[in-house]
């Protein structure tokens, strides 16, 4: 019991609860944090937008892995007005970048019209 209390105290004094609950985008960057905690600086992009939630067929429901593999960090959540204007909202509110590591790939802010919804 004493050891558990010690571990709890250590976690509260040395840990950062915000980092534990922060969302990650499809390129493994932590939304709202600098590059120390991911592949690129996302300090100004603190929200995660899922681009692949909508499906017309209940038989095609997406797995949790599929949903999270499509997330992008954005500056703010889009409103219905943002969505109805055009896809340019994502270009202004999302940060495209190339991941680092063994298999670099581009994290794109391109969102198709059928993947847009207000949050």
Image (cartoon, helix red, strand yellow):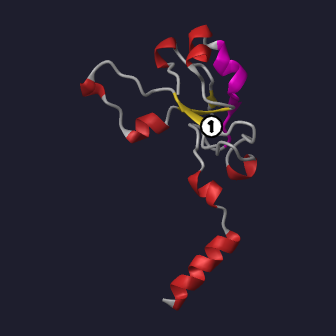
Quarter of the view holding residue 16: bottom right
Q: Is residue 90 above or below residue 27?
A: above
Q: Is residue 2 above or below residue 119?
A: below
The mark total stands at 1
User: Is 82 covered by the magenta stretch?
Assistant: no
Pick the residue in front: 103 or 72. 72
Pick the residue in front: 112 or 13. 13
Residue drawn where x is 62% and y is 32% of the image:
105
Determine the residue located farthest toward the bottom in the rendered image: 2
Determine the residue located farthest toward the top in the rendered image: 85
Q: Is residue 20 above or below residue 79?
A: below
Question: Does residue 95 appear to the left or right of 103 in the view shown?
Answer: right
Q: For the magenta stretch, what is the residue range?
A: 88-100
Pick the residue in front: 9 or 102. 9
Residue drawn where x is 69% and y is 71% of the image:
14
Image spot of residue 111 (x, y percent) = 56, 19
Image spot of residue 50 (x, y percent) = 51, 31
Q: Which residue is mark 1?
A: 47
Q: Residues within 10 Å of mark 1 (few under 14, many from 20)?
A: many
Secondary structure of residue under mark 1: strand
Q: Is residue 33 above or below residue 87?
A: below
User: Is 98 covered by the magenta stretch?
Assistant: yes
Quarter of the view holding residue 8: bottom right
Question: Does residue 84 appear to the left or right of 93 in the view shown?
Answer: left
Image spot of residue 73 (x, y percent) = 63, 34
């Amino acid at each position: 019991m004493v050891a558990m209390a010690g571990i709890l105290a250590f976690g509260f004094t040395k840990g950062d609860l915000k980092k534990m609950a922060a969302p990650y985008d499809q390129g493994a960057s932590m939304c709202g944090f600098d590059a120390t905690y991911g592949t690129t600086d996302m300090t100004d992009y603190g929200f995660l937008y899922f681009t692949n939630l909508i499906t017309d067929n209940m038989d095609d429901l997406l797995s949790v892995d599929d949903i999270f593999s499509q997330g992008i960090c954005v500056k703010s959540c889009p409103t219905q007005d943002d969505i109805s204007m055009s896809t340019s909202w994502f270009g202004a509110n999302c940060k495209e970048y190339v991941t680092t590591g063994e298999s670099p790939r581009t994290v794109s802010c391109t969102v198709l019209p059928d993947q847009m919804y207000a949050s």
